[in-house]
Image: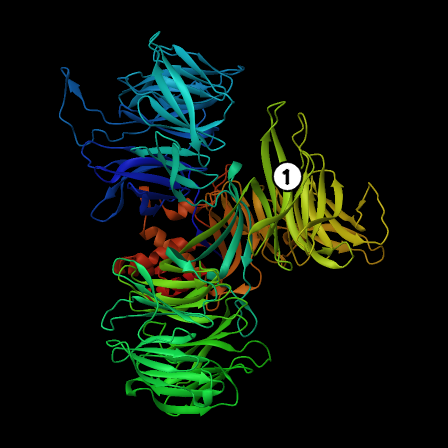
């Protein structure tokens, strides 16, 4: 029933280590992101992604170790969220992929409380690894040691250094803050930072661990019940020769040697530390929650011989979650609340210099879909196009709050700016040596002149005062390398052929009666140009001999002739939405197509005849003045046009420019207000947005120093760039500084409103002070244009947009904000809040329209028709109306009026089972996300006589769960995410036999993704033509992932589910893990399923495309079981999956 596709994988980094994983002597950076692992090569210039592989489960810990018989390090990977397992892998250099060393070991203990944090430890003496997941249970994983006899070590066996069976060690400390193995001990010594029961201060204990007969024995070591202060955060073991450990606290840092003696270093101002890394035996680096990096030194005082810590702040960066020292002062900073960074440390100022940035769009607290609403079919249905959808996300935490503009598309790597040039009207590349395969001359046309730039062999660029007899005092209409080693230049007054050897004009042709050439198109042999309604064909091989001339009734708006050899051309006209395919012999009409029967600006503005699809027919691209594109296939025999399709790229006229790729295939660059790359893939035409927002003209420029480059003209300058052939995520960031909590978008006014929260320290009490703002963002400039500060201690919790009455009583799109005032003292629950309604003036200023005081936090707010909205207030759901009156009135009980004359009135209330987390609406139907009791559906019922409105609960879920987010997909279907990382689709049983059946929400699909979902947004009215899955919703996670939920056609459900099952049975994951078991819904209360229920993971089944032929055949045939045979061919499955890839 349901289909899951990953649009963007997790980008948040919480775990990273270094290891010689790929090759001996080569340090790799290993980064875990949710349920996949990335391996980076470390170089002097940065880190480069080498490998990436999925893990069937959420990675919670990583450790590296090396058996003596192995040339490279092995990785221990621990996974879990409800069920916990670990396994080990190594790198297979022949197969070039990871291989299993130890299959997964389940160490789940459902009846034992989880610890507050997961820890993975590695003994410096290489005797033991350790995991801490459950309170009071240390999971020791001994390593095989080299045996000793008579004081001598025996010869190394094949298993020395490898791991042995897991041993459970019970600790008497329950509230453990941190665990570390110490340096310089013969047996593993474990230091435990904990908070003793009924005590105010932390304490440190140490234990020696010895392994005998497969069991780990715990014995007390030297340091016992050492006081650590009230704010101790973690431990740092100190390398020899000094040994011991640091006890890191917010107000002081203690160094404790192995005999328990202490020295101190005060921390001023008090600092909340997040992580640390060792640079050397006496140098360590600390990161704090504000993004500060501090150097911690351990120095021996010559006066008394004691080692004392010294602390120095060296710079600022992202807020670190993990730090990894790679080599020679190169430091990887992994962040979960901002961008991860590669940092170079220096001895001189600035000591911290960011060398490389790895984008992170997590945590995504909220997002909005800015689909461009352009793609439509002939029937008016919006066509789903992932390449033309952008997301606005509220990303980042702490000081790293950003509003991110995210889209999937083709990137441009800028090589350099050729210069600031305004008013460019055309670009062409030429080869000054016709026999060369490289371009070295760039022709740039302006309104009344032409400029020539010559590229030298060493990369130097020179502007030429003259070139081959070209007329530089006129605008060039087209420039071209023609047959016979000659150059073609067409201006508004003449056509010139120039000899490349002598640089002189060999032949010149001028239009009759002094007419102006308005446009032209040429290949190596032929040229066509237009003068008003007249079309002329010249033969370049016969010194511009005129072959054909024809005058049409309407003025020509665009034309194109395909590459040689050619017998046709295409022509479009002003004042009529018509395109013709003409014979070059006589300009007779071979086929024609009316594009639009309505009189509008939708006349052809640009044409292109090219073979875009490999092994397919030629394609005709027609760009109209309203930003839409028509595509046709051309019958090569009759020249008939067929397979008419339409997509809208923007709102401005489009220009086509073919770009020949390095593989010989044609790519088309379409410039408009939303520029795109058009290319063929898997037998279809693909449109991908490109990061060249202000481009006006483009030409390919394959030069010796810049192969496969393009030159792009914008309104301001001229750039040389390279097109990245891969379609990837592109991010534009607006740093806000504050945490961005909520986003709303007004399509009517093209404005974005965001809620931000700033944090400052109260100088009197030392407590954190939070201040909320409503900020207005201009969608065009992506900048803050106005802000509105909320009351002291008031936090904005919800935000939406909708049509409401403005100050003059007329309906207008505005913004609705729900707030809360935090409870004071022991009362954590908010007892009051506000509903605030804003409008935006024509000068883009925020105007307060109305305000309403509520008895509780407003956690969710949505529009229900024009002028009405529903809100989750405290423990109730309330329906409100915004009314306008000419006179002002105020009533504390149920109304709140403002100077604008707009009044908020309560219409109905409904008490929920616990606390409503959020609300969703669909055509008057309301879904309520109850935090503890799951989803329910309400309807508004209005009494015809009294005109009073009441709520009726028409359906609810009876399976209790901890809800995280919800959305209504239609009148009867609710899509939810819970706090355990599960996705569930619920549906009303409208055809149920009994009333109780009809009031029950039934769980019809479920799957586990292992990530916390913050927000779900419904996709409205979009379809994907020819697809067996239709898009229904987007949702985002704390880890920075973005997913698409789709609905599978009923006729294809069994095929896709059986494909997923067969594939999971045939292909096991790392650690021998089964995909279906990993994706089965599980909660902290119970493991309810053994596999996903009526849910298909698109990324998993797409792995079928990479299978060897024999394995793919076995999967289709049911792995030898006739009952599991899919009943289709391998090619059928490939075709289906290639279509489904279009969803993302």
Tell me which residue sits at (40%, 48%) in the image: 1076
Q: Nearer the viewer, residue 70 or 243?
A: 243
Tell me which residue sits at (22%, 49%) in the image: 95
Q: Nearer the viewer, residue 716 or 289?
A: 716
Q: Left or right: where does residue 324 sit relative to residue 797?
A: left
Residue 984 against residue 819 in the figure, above or below: below
Residue 685's x, y, as percent?
41, 69
Residue 984's x, y, as percent?
53, 49
Asked whether residue 369 appears in the rendered view, the answer is: yes
Which residue, given by chain and number where applicable, does mark 1 sit on?
772
Residue 1072's x, y, as percent?
32, 43
Residue 392's x, y, as percent?
54, 51
Specify how the rendered protein is coloured.
rainbow
Packing grade of label 1 (10 A; few <14, some 14-19, many >=20) is many
The outermost residue toward the front is: 465
Q: Quadrant of the C terminus?
A: bottom left
Q: Nearer the viewer, residue 554 or 368?
A: 554
Q: What element does badge 1 sit on?
A: strand
Q: Count numbered badges in the picture.
A: 1
Tell me which residue sits at (47%, 86%) in the image: 515
Q: Nearer the viewer, residue 315 or 596?
A: 315
Asked whether residue 132 appears in the rendered view, the answer is: no
What is the quadrant of residue 462 in the picture? bottom left
């Amino acid at each position: 029933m349901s289909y899951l596709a990953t649009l963007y994988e997790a980008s948040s980094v919480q775990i990273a280590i270094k290891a010689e994983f790929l090759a001996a002597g080569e340090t790799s950076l290993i980064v875990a992101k949710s349920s996949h692992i990335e391996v980076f090569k470390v170089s002097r210039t940065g880190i480069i992604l080498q490998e990436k592989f999925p893990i069937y489960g959420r990675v919670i810990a990583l450790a590296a170790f090396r058996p003596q018989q192995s040339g490279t390090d092995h990785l221990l990977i621990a996974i879990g969220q409800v069920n916990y397992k670990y396994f080990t892998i190594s790198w297979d250099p022949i197969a070039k992929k990871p291989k299993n060393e130890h299959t997964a070991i389940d160490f789940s203990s459902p009846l034992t409380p989880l610890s507050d944090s997961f820890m993975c430890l590695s003994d410096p003496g290489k005797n033991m690894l350790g995991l801490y997941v459950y309170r009071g249970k240390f999971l020791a994983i001994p390593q095989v040691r080299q045996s000793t006899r008579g004081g001598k070590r025996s010869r190394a066996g094949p298993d020395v250094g490898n791991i042995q069976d897991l041993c459970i060690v019970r600790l008497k400390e329950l509230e453990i803050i941190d665990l570390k193995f110490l340096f310089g001990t013969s047996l593993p010594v474990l230091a435990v930072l904990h908070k003793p029961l009924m005590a105010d201060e932390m304490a440190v204990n140490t234990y020696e661990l010895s392994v005998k007969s497969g069991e780990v024995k715990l014995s007390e070591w030297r340091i016992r019940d050492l006081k650590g202060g009230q704010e101790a955060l973690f431990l740092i073991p100190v390398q020899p020769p000094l040994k011991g450990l640091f006890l890191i606290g917010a107000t002081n840092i203690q160094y404790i040697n192995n005999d328990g003696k202490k020295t101190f270093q005060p921390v001023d101002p008090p600092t909340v530390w997040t992580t640390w890394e060792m640079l050397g035996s006496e140098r360590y680096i600390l990161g704090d929650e504000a993004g500060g990096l501090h150097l911690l030194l351990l120095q021996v005082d010559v006066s008394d011989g004691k080692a004392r810590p010294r602390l120095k702040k060296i710079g600022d960066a992202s807020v670190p979650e993990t730090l990894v020292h790679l080599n020679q002062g190169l430091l990887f900073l992994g962040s979960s609340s901002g961008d991860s960074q590669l940092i170079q440390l220096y001895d001189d100022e600035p000591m911290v210099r960011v060398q490389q940035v790895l984008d992170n769009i997590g945590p995504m607290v909220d997002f909005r879909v800015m689909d461009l609403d352009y793609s439509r079919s002939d029937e008016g249905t919006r066509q789903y196009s992932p390449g033309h959808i952008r997301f606005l996300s509220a990303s980042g935490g702490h000081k790293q709050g950003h509003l991110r503009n995210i889209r999937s598309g083709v990137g441009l790597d800028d090589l350099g700016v050729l210069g600031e040039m305004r008013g460019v009207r055309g670009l062409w590349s030429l080869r000054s040596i016709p026999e060369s395969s490289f371009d070295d001359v760039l022709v740039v046309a302006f309104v009344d002149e032409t400029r020539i730039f010559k590229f030298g062999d060493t990369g130097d660029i020179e502007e030429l005062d003259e070139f081959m007899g070209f007329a530089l005092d006129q605008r060039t209409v087209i420039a071209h390398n023609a047959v016979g080693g000659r150059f073609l230049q067409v201006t508004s007054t003449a056509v010139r052929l120039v000899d490349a050897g002598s640089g002189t004009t060999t032949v010149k042709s001028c239009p009759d009666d002094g007419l102006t050439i308005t446009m032209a198109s040429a290949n190596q042999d032929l040229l066509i140009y237009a003068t008003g309604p007249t079309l002329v064909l010249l033969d370049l091989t016969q010194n511009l001999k005129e072959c054909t001339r024809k005058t049409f009734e309407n003025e020509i708006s665009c034309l194109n002739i395909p590459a040689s050899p050619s017998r046709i051309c295409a022509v479009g006209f002003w004042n009529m939405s018509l395109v013709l395919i003409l014979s070059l012999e006589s300009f007779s009409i071979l086929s024609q197509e009316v594009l639009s029967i309505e009189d509008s600006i939708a006349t052809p503005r640009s044409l292109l005849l090219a073979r875009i699809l490999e092994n397919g027919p030629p394609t005709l691209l027609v760009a109209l003045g309203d930003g839409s594109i028509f595509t046709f296939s051309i019958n090569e025999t009759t020249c008939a046009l067929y397979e008419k399709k339409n997509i809208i790229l923007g709102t401005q006229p489009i220009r086509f420019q073919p770009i020949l790729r390095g593989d010989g295939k044609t790519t088309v660059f379409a410039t408009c207000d939303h520029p795109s790359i058009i290319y063929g893939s898997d037998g279809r035409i693909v449109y991908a947005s490109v990061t060249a927002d202000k481009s006006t003209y483009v030409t390919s420029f394959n030069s010796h120093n810049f192969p496969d480059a393009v030159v792009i003209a914008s309104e301001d300058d001229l750039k040389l760039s390279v097109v990245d052939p891969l379609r990837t995520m592109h991010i534009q960031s607006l740093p806000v500084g504050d945490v961005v909590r909520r986003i709303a978008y007004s399509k009517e006014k093209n404005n974005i409103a965001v809620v931000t929260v700033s944090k400052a320290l109260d100088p009197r009490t030392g407590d954190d002070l939070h201040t909320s703002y409503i900020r207005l963002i201009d969608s065009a400039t992506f900048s803050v244009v106005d802000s509105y500060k909320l009351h002291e201690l008031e936090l904005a919790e919800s935000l939406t947009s909708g049509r409401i009455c403005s100050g003059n009583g007329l309906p207008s799109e505005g913004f609705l904000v729900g707030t809360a005032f935090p409870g004071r003292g022991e009362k954590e629950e908010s007892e009051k809040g506000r509903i605030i309604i804003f409008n935006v003036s024509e000068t883009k200023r925020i105007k307060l329209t109305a305000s309403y005081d509520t008895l509780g936090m407003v956690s969710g707010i949505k529009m229900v028709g024009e002028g009405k909205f529903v809100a989750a207030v405290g423990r109730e759901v309330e329906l409100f109306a915004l009314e306008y009156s000419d006179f002002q009135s105020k009533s504390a009980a149920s109304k709140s009026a403002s100077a604008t004359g707009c009044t908020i009135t309560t219409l109905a209330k409904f008490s929920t089972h616990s606390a409503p987390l959020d609300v969703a609406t669909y055509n008057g139907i309301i879904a309520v996300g109850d935090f503890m009791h799951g989803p329910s559906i309400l309807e508004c019922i209005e009494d015809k006589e009294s005109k009073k409105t009441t709520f009726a609960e028409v359906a609810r879920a009876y399976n209790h769960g901890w809800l995280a987010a919800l959305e209504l997909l239609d009148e009867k279907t609710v899509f939810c995410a819970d706090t355990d990382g599960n996705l569930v689709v619920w549906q009303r049983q409208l055809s149920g036999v009994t009333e109780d059946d009809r009031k029950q929400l039934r769980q019809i699909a479920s799957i586990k993704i292992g990530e916390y979902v913050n927000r779900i947004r419904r996709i409205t009215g979009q379809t994907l033509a020819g697809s067996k899955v239709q898009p229904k919703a987007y949702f985002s996670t704390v880890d920075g992932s973005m997913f698409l939920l789709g609905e599978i056609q009923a006729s294809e459900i069994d095929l896709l589910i059986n494909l997923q099952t067969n594939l999971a049975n045939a292909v096991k994951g790392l650690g021998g893990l089964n995909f279906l078991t990993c994706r089965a819904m599980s909660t902290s209360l119970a493991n309810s399923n053994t596999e996903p229920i009526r849910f298909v993971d698109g990324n998993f089944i797409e792995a079928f495309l990479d299978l060897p032929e024999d394995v793919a055949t076995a999967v289709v045939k049911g792995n030898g079981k006739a009952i599991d045979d899919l009943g289709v061919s391998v090619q059928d499955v490939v075709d289906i999956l290639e279509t489904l890839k279009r969803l993302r």
